[in-house]
Image (tube, grey):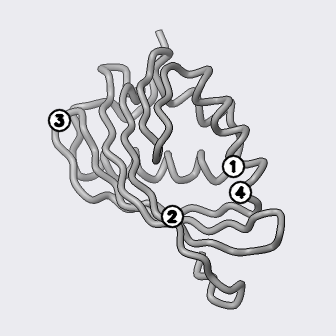
């Protein structure tokens, strides 16, 4: 059985560890590595997309990082309870035309007993920025 530590129920310390682990994984831009943090039957809402299962997540991430170039993410713990974590985040990327963006958002996560994320609901907004205004 796959396990992804730390396991729920979360304390403030273990919730922060989970958030940092997610940030570190996403910043690798490795769809396979990132997708292994989710249950095989994970449910996602990402903006207007609804994904079901680890394979769909992996395909989504492959598409994402083919178009969001020089991607860099920062996550922050917003709250936690038992097997749930709320996160605020921002990330920066540029498109193929060279336009930079900063994306802001919130995520709600629910984990199974093995520490794998079974639900991820993300609300995200993109702001066009100048390269000189990058923070991350």
The residue under the point 30% across, 33% down is 110
Give the mark nearest the N terminus, 3 or 4. 4
Mark 1–mark 2 Cα distance, whole angstroms, equals: 12 Å
**Pointer 1: what residue?**
28
Disc 3 and disc 1 in contact, CB within 8 angstroms: no
Check disc 4 and report its element: helix, strand or loop: loop
Q: Which of the two labelled residues, at mark 1 and mark 4, occupies the earlier sequence position?
A: 1
Q: Please, is residue 91 above or below residue 115 in the view?
A: below
Task: Name the spot of residue 60 as percent of width and height, x first.
Answer: 63, 35
**Residue holding disc 2:** 74
Q: Earlier in the sequence, mark 1 or mark 2?
A: 1
| Residue matched to label 3 | 82
Crowd rating for badge 1 (residues with CA inside 10 Å; few <14, some 14–19, many 20+)? few
Could you tell me if the residues under marks 3 and 2 are in contact, i.e. CB atoms within 8 Å?
no
Q: Quadrant of residue 78?
A: bottom left
Q: Position of residue 114 (x, y in %)?
A: 37, 20
């Amino acid at each position: 059985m796959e396990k992804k530590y730390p396991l729920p129920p979360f304390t403030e310390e273990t919730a922060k560890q989970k958030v940092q682990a997610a940030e570190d994984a996403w910043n690798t831009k490795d769809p396979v590595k990132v997708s292994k943090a989710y249950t095989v039957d994970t449910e996602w809402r990402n903006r207007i997309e609804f994904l079901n299962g680890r394979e769909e997540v992996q395909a989504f991430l492959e598409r994402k990082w083919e178009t969001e170039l020089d991607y860099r993410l920062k996550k922050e713990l917003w709250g936690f309870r038992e097997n749930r974590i709320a996160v605020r985040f921002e990330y920066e990327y540029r498109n193929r035309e060279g336009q930079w963006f900063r994306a802001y958002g919130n995520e709600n996560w629910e984990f199974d007993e093995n520490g794998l994320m079974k639900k991820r609901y993300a609300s995200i907004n993109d702001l066009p920025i100048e390269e000189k205004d990058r923070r991350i």
